[in-house]
Amino acid sequence: MWKPDRGSDKPLYAQIADDLARRISSGEFPPGTRLPSERSLAELLGVNRSTVVLAFGELRAAGIVESRTGSGTRVSRGGWGAAPKQTPNWSRYAEDGGFLPNLPLMRRIREALSRHPSLIDFASGELSADLAPAAEIAALLREQDDIAYLGYDNPQGHMPLREALASYLARYRGIRTTASSVLITSGSQQSLFLIAQCLLAPGDAVAVEDPSYCRSLPMFQSAGLRVFRLPVDEHGTRPGDIRALRKKHRVKMVFLNPNYQNPTGTVLGAERRKELLEAASGLGLPIVEDDPFSLTAFGERPPDPLKAMDADGSVLYIGSFSKIAASGLRIGWMVAPNAIVERLADARQQMDFGLSVIPQRIVARFLESPYFRPHLERLRTELQFKRDLLIDALRKELPDQVEFAVPRGGLHLWCRLRHAVQDGKLLDEAIRRGTVFVPGSVYGSAPGYVRFTYARPRAEDIGPGVAAFAEALRAMEHGPGGP
Amino acid sequence: MWKPDRGSDKPLYAQIADDLARRISSGEFPPGTRLPSERSLAELLGVNRSTVVLAFGELRAAGIVESRTGSGTRVSRGGWGAAPKQTPNWSRYAEDGGFLPNLPLMRRIREALSRHPSLIDFASGELSADLAPAAEIAALLREQDDIAYLGYDNPQGHMPLREALASYLARYRGIRTTASSVLITSGSQQSLFLIAQCLLAPGDAVAVEDPSYCRSLPMFQSAGLRVFRLPVDEHGTRPGDIRALRKKHRVKMVFLNPNYQNPTGTVLGAERRKELLEAASGLGLPIVEDDPFSLTAFGERPPDPLKAMDADGSVLYIGSFSKIAASGLRIGWMVAPNAIVERLADARQQMDFGLSVIPQRIVARFLESPYFRPHLERLRTELQFKRDLLIDALRKELPDQVEFAVPRGGLHLWCRLRHAVQDGKLLDEAIRRGTVFVPGSVYGSAPGYVRFTYARPRAEDIGPGVAAFAEALRAMEHGPGGP
């Protein structure tokens, strides 16, 4: 994004005024819309607020904007064509649509990260840049010499990738499947979206773990679903709870993340897995199994997925490369019965016409390349190292204030604060001190939790990040004036 | 997809039985589901129906499938775990979801193309493989040596691509905009989907051209929108119709494709453009302008888009590289006011977490590379050549049976049949003779039209394709037993 040039002869305020005038005339801010506040613009551009005040003054003098006390600065209507012209009420359109926006806390985190890229980021649920196989991907890109076809691809996804995935799933996850049972999606996210939009209808009841990633998705509400909770203990969800919910609310689908669950890190117990599949099978109840973390397991063989034991075809299995390679590839998949794969592929055509063939080709080659296995080994070692750094830092900085179970895989640590605090405020305090995390209320109903993603910050930032968090927590506990 | 190996010692029927058994045990066809019919499987695998009958016999003998007269062949329940197990009723889930499937005619075309890849394809609205800049893209891929970050990208899309697009739009389309007003999408399709889902709510009224691509999108109905028609004549839509619809149905948004409209090829007249913008501005009514074809213009400067004259900020402008470079890149964009771009970027995060950075990087470089302009010139020349081949073939094969306006850009020719026939039947007759097109009823309300996409078939197939179409039409006109 544009920043004023401090080396220029032109004063900063004039540069800012010119940039705003250009953006206004280009339609970014149509007549009548409100400009960002002086404070937020100052933060965004890295200048003093007084500089922005001067810039706004310039624009006001030119008749380009108007300010009114209490309602901020707006783009003038007068200057843009003769009255009585009307600009569509865009904010109204943005607010009135059927699809719900992201949770306010999540938007606050995203905004903070985009304004202050130097924040130590325990919030984004992904790998740090150095853990992605960037050099390997670049090497594979350079080998692409035979691109014969760049048209619309098969609605289910690129066939060579689906074939590579079928082998991958057999080898690494014990799942026997075929290319025609695989749908390629834009990460697990799109699998969840397609299921919510296309296999369920408004008013349907679904069950999700509490806490869970699914709880953080307004997307479920946007699809009109009624969402019920399955409490997670140290061995995951209890099958009895699923039977009870089915009976009470006629739940139509269950969403589970059995291995290294997000956010708790829990692994669903072996007995429960059996019971769960029996329950599902007895009730004809579909289970959506999200399995993004298994290949990060630290020094243990991850349990087989439910799908590998799913003799009765109750499980829709979803996975992705976001957590084990790179989220920017946007490659995920679903393994499902024929009728479902075809239905979802058809719907996806209408939504986005499928994924680009280019990353699909690259990932197919990556899976079959000699790079894949060493990458996984390096990834596991580094993640475990970073997990341990986080744990050491938490024990050092907050020995009596936090408790957690040590995750045996995955990217996240779920941390209970002994003294619960208002978590939006804690987030603000932490941001002010240079770090960001996800408040537990985003994922679950119990108060006083925090999700730290140890995968995302650089190793050397983990200690300082936890120190900043500890300061924020102490500031909350002692009040703003405390020690 | 798997095909039996004719060189193998193992009989074809046994190979097919083995493949089906494998697919059944892998969950592609869960217990209780119906297998494809003998006839369709025979077609799919390129074998005689009797071979499939033998294969099904094998599976029946092994207890893997059961056949009952009149209800086809189903996967046995008995063989897969003890009763009373239940597989979720997947077909029910596939049918009951809130999102509507594609139009039956469109699914029939897609199915025909996937079963018979040798069909001469006038149906798919895209470029033939040889018109895509495949060599150029491959060259740019080989230059990718500095992939530093493969994480989640900016929700609006990759910044260097948005910047390249802002320059591109200024240079080629006369649109002044900035990177922060651009949202990158998975083709125009996703722009339309996001608008329908997020800026409109169930019950809202919208207006679309008749005929138009938008009419073919069940996606509008899935969003619960009421869709009203704006008849298209040789100069496009009439502004008066928009005013009338706004008044009568409180239309909240208008979807237009002013240049080389799909499917008619019409260009919206200069006077009407002005009137339209005045009407929109007077009513505060947003216009969605879809502009995918302008750079294909044959030997004329395409009219400036509405967006270039949009002083009052009434226009959401959408475009894509699908029709001027390659649909498999899946790169499109929207130019919109800040509030809209942010709202849609947020929603898109929940749907698919954005596009892969890899094709975005490639397209950004392509736009700024010396390859781009020569590609466009070659594209225009070849498209015009193919358009002329189609016109010559139609005049030769069906001199008295068809009429059409000669399109001055775009990929399609909209053709009226002097004697209207039942268009699903005509499609079947054409498929049987080796070609496929889109029946006009998919796009519009007037009977007796056909859309031919001259961009898609190879040049040498255009003549034979039209000959096959002409035969199909004659077979309809004279009845099945006719000459």
Image: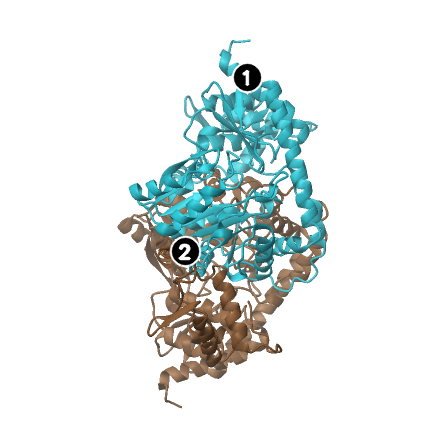
Chain colours: A cyan, B brown
Residue bearing mark 1: A400
Q: Are marks 2 and 1 on the same chain?
A: no
* Marker disc for residue B272: 2
Q: Residue at x 64, y 48 (%)?
A: B361
Q: Residue at x 47, y 54 (%)?
A: B189
Left or right of A135 in this view: A306: left
**Badge 2: residue crowd in 10 Å (few <14, some 14–19, many ≥20):** some
Q: Element under label 1?
A: loop
Residue B471 appears in the figure: yes
Q: Are marks 2 and 1 in contact (CB under 8 Å)?
A: no
**Badge 1: residue crowd in 10 Å (few <14, some 14–19, many ≥20):** few
Q: Nearer the viewer, residue A355 or A380?
A: A380
Q: Give residue A421's position: percent from left, percent from top.
A: 46, 19
Q: Element under label 2?
A: helix
Left or right of A461 in this view: B81: left
Residue B395 appears in the figure: no
- Marks 2/1: CA–CA distance: 73 Å
Looking at the image, the residue that sits furthest to the left is: B248
Amino acid at dot 1: Asp
Q: Give residue A90's position: percent from left, percent from top.
A: 41, 39
Question: In the figure, residue B440 lies in which quadrant?
Answer: bottom left
Q: Nearer the viewer, residue B118 or B378?
A: B118
Viewer-nearest of discs 2 and 1: 1
